[in-house]
Image (cartoon, rainbow, N blue to C red):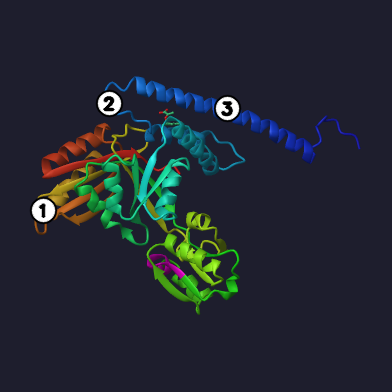
């Protein structure tokens, strides 16, 4: 059969040659980008003018990732492509200045997963035992940024995190949302049929209850201090031939070298946790931002109404309202309010000015880019 097109046959060796040649071009370009980032660091240092140099720029990184997604034509999906660029930027930033990130540990927690999602893998991990320790580590300057959970779509608000903002001067520099997927994990040398005990954090056991009732009705469920600890125990048990399974996430699975027996076993597939990035900087507008406020209101009739009315009148979209005891006076309250926009945007500014007239204290906890990934 004759073929008018002079197409090069798509044989395996030819395709692999083409991939090799593309790879070497990509590699050159990535290093060219890294050299630019190094120069950016030099400029930042030269321009510091006595100020602390800020190497990590969340608003710029959010803009880069948004642009990657906007111009993406496939076949790789937008998120997949953004994840690749996320890691490229992480490597470039590490070349400018390695970032030490404190997070709610131990190694392998969902908070660590969130930290890696937000900053990429080229960070120095600093797992902390408690949320207030994450705050302290950043306040003391021992870590550059911290990552803490703030709310879960099934379990609600994380009070410890909100309360930590009361006495802290740290700013919110970013947010990250993570779909919480649980997996049933065993040591690779263990046959899943032999499993007699399943270890996990109490919340994870609860989030997988229906699945466990259905598929593992006879296994004993054991609550331990964290999912990561459950994974560590399952790996340990495997070494002495004991068949213990763990319910934990992806990072713990990799960290402890476990095998997945079943993936995504959570009863509610939309189970999501939102995390905050805390640091010492005011983040400039990225074009698509959110702001978090802490407000102490006078305990008088209509106090909350007068606060909320300002948002309505200026057309500012409030996305969250939480109430916590103020601890300063009995039955005094602190409100945590999130809204769409940056505190430097004109109408957001107007709302904040009015709130200041109506409340005893208004603290801008930070304006930060809406999570991209
Ligand atoms: C290169 C810069 O520094 C860092 C690295 C970035 C990157 O690799 O694109 C972006 C923002 C900063 O976190 C910059 O500020 O532009």
Report x, y in % for residue 11.
80, 39
As helix, strand or loop, the secondary structure at mark 2 comes to loop
State which region is magenta: 199-206
> Which badge, 3 or 1, is on the more N-terminal residue?
3
Q: CA distance from mark 3 to mark 1?
A: 56 Å
The picture places residue 108, in percent across and down from the top left corner, at 45, 55
Along the line of sight, which residue is nearer the eye, 361 or 205? 205
Q: Quadrant of residue 77?
A: top right
28 lies left or right of 342: right
Q: How many marks?
A: 3
x 60%, y 66%: residue: 189
- Looking at the image, do the residues carrying marks 1 and 2 touch, with CB atoms under 8 Å apart? no
* Residue 335 appears left or right of 114: left
Relative depth, front residue between 296 and 203:
203
Helix, strand or loop under label 3? helix
Q: State the residue position of label 3.
A: 29
Q: Which residue is labeled 2 in the image?
A: 51
Q: Residue lying furthest front in this view?
A: 240
Q: Quadrant of the C terminus?
A: top left
Q: Which residue is mark 1?
A: 328
User: Of discs 3 and 2, which sits in the foreground?
Assistant: 2
Q: Position of residue 319 (x, y in %)?
A: 30, 48
Report which quarter residue 73 is drawn in.
top right
Q: Is residue 297 left or right of residue 221?
A: left
Ligand 1 position by quadrant = top left
């Amino acid at each position: 059969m004759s073929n008018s097109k002079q197409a090069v046959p798509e044989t395996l060796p030819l395709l692999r040659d083409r991939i090799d040649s593309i790879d070497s071009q990509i590699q050159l370009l990535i290093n060219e980008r890294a050299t630019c980032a190094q120069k950016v660091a030099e400029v930042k240092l030269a321009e510091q003018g006595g100020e602390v140099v800020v190497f990590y720029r969340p608003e710029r990184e959010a803009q880069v990732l948004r642009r990657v997604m906007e111009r993406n034509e496939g076949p790789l999906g937008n998120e997949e492509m953004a994840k690749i660029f996320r890691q490229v930027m992480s490597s470039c930033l590490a070349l400018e200045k390695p970032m030490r990130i404190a997070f709610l540990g131990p190694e392998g927690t969902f908070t660590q997963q969130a930290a890696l999602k937000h900053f990429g893998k080229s960070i120095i991990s600093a797992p902390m035992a408690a949320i207030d320790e994450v705050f302290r580590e950043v306040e003391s300057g021992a870590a550059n940024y911290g990552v803490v959970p703030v709310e879960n779509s099934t379990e609600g608000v994380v009070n410890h995190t909100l309360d930590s903002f009361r006495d802290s001067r740290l700013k919110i520099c970013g947010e990250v949302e993570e779909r919480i997927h649980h997996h049933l994990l065993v040591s690779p040398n263990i046959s899943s049929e032999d499993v007699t005990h399943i270890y996990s954090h109490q919340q994870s056991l609860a989030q997988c209850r229906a699945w466990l009732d259905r598929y593992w009705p006879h296994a004993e469920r054991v609550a331990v201090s964290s999912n990561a600890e459950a994974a560590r125990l399952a790996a340990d048990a495997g070494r002495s031939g004991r068949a213990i399974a763990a319910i934990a996430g992806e990072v713990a699975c990799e960290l402890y070298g476990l095998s997945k027996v079943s993936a995504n076993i959570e009863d509610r597939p939309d189970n999501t946790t939102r995390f905050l990035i805390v640091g010492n900087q005011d983040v400039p507008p990225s074009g698509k931002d959110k702001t978090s406020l802490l407000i102490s209101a006078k305990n008088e009739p209509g106090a909350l109404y007068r606060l909320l009315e300002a948002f309505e009148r200026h057309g500012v979209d409030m996305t969250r309202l939480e109430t916590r005891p103020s601890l300063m006076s009995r039955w005094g309250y602190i409100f945590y309010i999130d809204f769409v926009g940056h505190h430097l945007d004109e109408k957001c500014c107007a709302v904040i000015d009015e709130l200041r007239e109506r409340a005893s204290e208004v603290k801008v906890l930070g304006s930060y880019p809406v999570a991209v990934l």
